[in-house]
Image (spheres, rainbow, N blue to C red):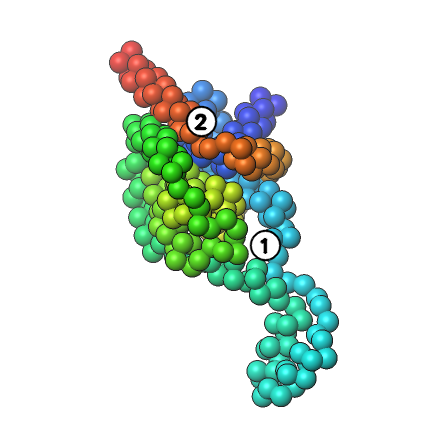
């Protein structure tokens, strides 16, 4: 029972911090210091990644109508007459697209794929090295403080600008790629994937709403990919206890993520991100102070 309470708390932390630009990794490291799960180190590392699947499913559910690229619609007689003049193969493909595909949503998915390219090319090859060398409290604390300051500076700078992209359909492939480049920064623990991509979006000229929504969507392939890699590395054989921990953690993260996403989208319609910047700075200082004090006492 105590172990499940720990898992529930971790799920709550994941659900909140995955979408707010305050670093889920930084919070998980801090929480793990006080609430250590009674599991192997290898499984714990897996759990901290796979629990994100619950969080990402919240995005899929909340934004299903914006993301699902298929539907069924009749083809008008005029359009059918145009299709009938095409060669057989082309006619079949174009008819399928016309009947079952939402072209605007397919374009959005292509933009998401383009934004993932930098992470695939740069982030994945060095993932194990970064995890080994940089997954410590010093790096996390510095990243929390640095990007906290950056949020404040960028928001002050952004007051003098008007966004050039105020809706997802106006988001260009170039802007999507720029946001993807900023996502690479999040391989450093404590940076925050949502934080780095939102900063990239704002600097590239998107509104806060567009930057946040595209960040949510960008998380779908990234988190599924990261979870799959962890599962392949760990294997798909779990004890009953381990399976229960994964399921409970993901379910809690899913429910809390829905609340966190709705809160964030409502908040940024009237406010900027500076409050998250200040929060990161305070948290980074607390993390540094705690672990330095702990090492000195030891």
In the visual, does 41 lie left or right of 81?
Answer: left
Disc on the earlier residue, 1 or 2: 1
As drawn, the label of residue 124 is: none
Q: Residue 51, percent across and down?
A: 52, 39
The front one of 234 and 193 is 193
Q: Quadrant of residue 175?
A: bottom left
Label 1: which secondary element: helix
As drawn, the label of residue 67 is: 1
Q: Quadrant of residue 240?
A: top right
Q: Residue 57, percent across and down?
A: 59, 45
Q: Residue 238, percent across and down?
A: 54, 41
Label 2: which secondary element: helix
In the visual, does 189 lie left or right of 229?
Answer: left
Q: Residue furthest top?
A: 297
Residue tagged 2 = 275
Q: Nearer the viewer, mark 1 or mark 2?
A: 2
Q: Kindly indicate whether the residue at mark 2 contacts the one at mark 1 (C-beta within 8 angstroms).
A: no
Q: Residue at x 31, y 42 (%)?
A: 130
Q: Residue at x 32, y 17 (%)?
A: 289
Locate the N terminus and report the quarter of the image it occupies: top right
Locate the C terminus and report the quarter of the image it occupies: top left
Distance from the alpha carbon under mark 1 to that under mark 2: 30 Å
């Amino acid at each position: 029972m105590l172990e499940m309470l720990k898992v529930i708390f971790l799920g709550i932390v994941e659900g909140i911090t995955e979408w707010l630009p305050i670093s889920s990794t930084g919070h998980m490291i801090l929480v793990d210091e006080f609430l250590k799960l009674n599991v192997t180190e290898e499984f714990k590392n897996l759990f901290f990644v796979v629990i994100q699947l619950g969080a990402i499913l919240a995005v899929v559910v909340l934004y299903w109508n914006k993301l699902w690229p298929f539907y069924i619609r009749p083809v008008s007689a005029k359009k059918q007459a145009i299709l009938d003049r095409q060669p057989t193969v082309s006619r079949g493909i174009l008819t399928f697209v016309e009947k079952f595909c939402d072209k605007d949503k397919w374009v959005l998915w292509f933009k998401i794929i383009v934004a993932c390219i930098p992470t695939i090319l740069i982030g994945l090859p060095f993932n194990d090295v970064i995890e080994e060398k940089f997954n410590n409290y010093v790096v996390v604390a510095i990243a929390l403080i640095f990007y906290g300051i950056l949020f404040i500076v960028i928001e002050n700078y952004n007051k003098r600008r008007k966004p050039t992209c105020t809706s997802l359909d106006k988001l260009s492939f170039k802007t999507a790629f720029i946001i993807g480049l900023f996502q690479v920064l999040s391989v450093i623990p404590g940076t925050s994937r949502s934080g780095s991509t939102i900063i990239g979006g704002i600097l590239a000229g998107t509104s806060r709403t567009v930057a946040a929504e595209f960040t949510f969507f960008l998380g779908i392939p990234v988190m599924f990919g990261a979870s799959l890699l962890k599962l392949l590395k760990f294997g798909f054989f779990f004890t009953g206890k381990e399976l229960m921990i994964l399921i409970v953690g993901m379910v809690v993260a899913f429910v809390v993520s829905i609340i966190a996403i709705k809160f964030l989208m409502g908040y940024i319609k009237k406010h900027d991100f500076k409050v998250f910047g200040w929060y990161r700075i305070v948290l980074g200082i607390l993390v540094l102070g705690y672990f330095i004090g702990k090492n000195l006492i030891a």
